[in-house]
Image (cartoon, helix red, strand yellow):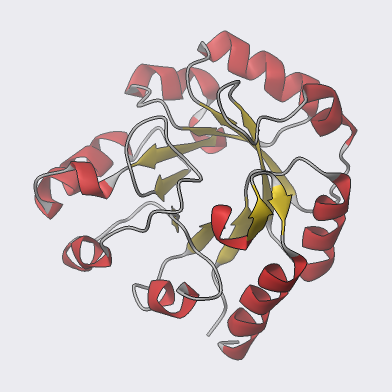
Amino acid sequence: MPRPLVKVCGMTRMEDVRLCVDLGVDLLGFIFHSKSPRNADPDFVASVKTGKVTKVGVFVDQTADEVMGIMDRCGLHAAQLHGGQDVNYCWQIGPDRVIRAFWPDTYNSPQALSRDLDNYSEVCGHFLLDAGGKGQGGTGKTIDFSILQDIEIQTPWFLAGGLGPDNIRTALAVNPPGLDINSGVEAAPGIKDETKLREVFKILAEME
């Protein structure tokens, strides 16, 4: 069984980028949100060369034009949208370049979540299902995985929310096509913990 795609988010240091690339991470996430302790310097992100690893920008409250400008400047392949952006906004960025965040815990039923996902299915290349609420990320909270067992998601998606060595096996039980890892592999906000990262990849290697 192939392992899920792995995205490590909240990158702020070149040594962490190199470690992730060496470990075989598929996507790297850089946060462009001034209120985040993991806010990335655009010049740093532009300088990062990741080879075949996809560079993703995480955005909350910028306009679509601002997002596309940062993507061009920094050489980003995709935009991860955490501000509850609407369908038209996603169209402007380009469906093949959008990873749109949803927060299952804010829905009153799995059916309500499923309807919202269906509404966005044609304008998003991927979904990201996260803990907490709009605009949040890296909170360390985890999703109530049970809500995901009652819906069928056609669009490729990432599971996020406090994932790390202690709970990655539980997360894998819901068969996510992708994993988004951030606070669960940190020593401090924006500073990755090499031991935790290596442990996650050791666990993932066991399933291949």
Q: Is residue 170 left or right of residue 99?
A: left
Which residue lies most toward the bottom here?
206
- Residue 79 is situated, as x and y percent measured from the top left of the image, at 57, 32
Of 177 and 190, the residue lying toward us:
190
Q: Is residue 205 depicted above or below 92 in this figure?
A: below
Identity of the residue drawn at 72% across and 30% down? 40
Tell me where residue 124 sits by quadrant.
top left
Identity of the residue drawn at 62% across and 74% down? 200
Q: Is residue 77 left or right of residue 170?
A: right
Q: Is residue 116 depicted above or below 16 in this figure?
A: above
Q: Is residue 41 depicted above or below 64 in this figure?
A: below
Q: Is residue 182 left or right of residue 52?
A: left
Of 76 and 171, the residue lying toward us:
171
Report the label total: 0
Identity of the residue drawn at 32% across and 37% down? 133
- Residue 85 is situated, as x and y percent measured from the top left of the image, at 38, 23
Q: Is residue 181 visible?
A: no
Identity of the residue drawn at 39% across and 54% down? 141
Where, quadrant-wise, is the C terminus in this rendering? bottom right
- Residue 149 is situated, as x and y percent measured from the top left of the image, at 22, 68
- Residue 100 is situated, as x and y percent measured from the top left of the image, at 43, 37
Of 171 and 63, the residue lying toward us:
171
Q: Is residue 2 visible?
A: yes
Tell me where residue 197 sits by quadrant.
bottom right
Which residue lies most toward the front here?
188
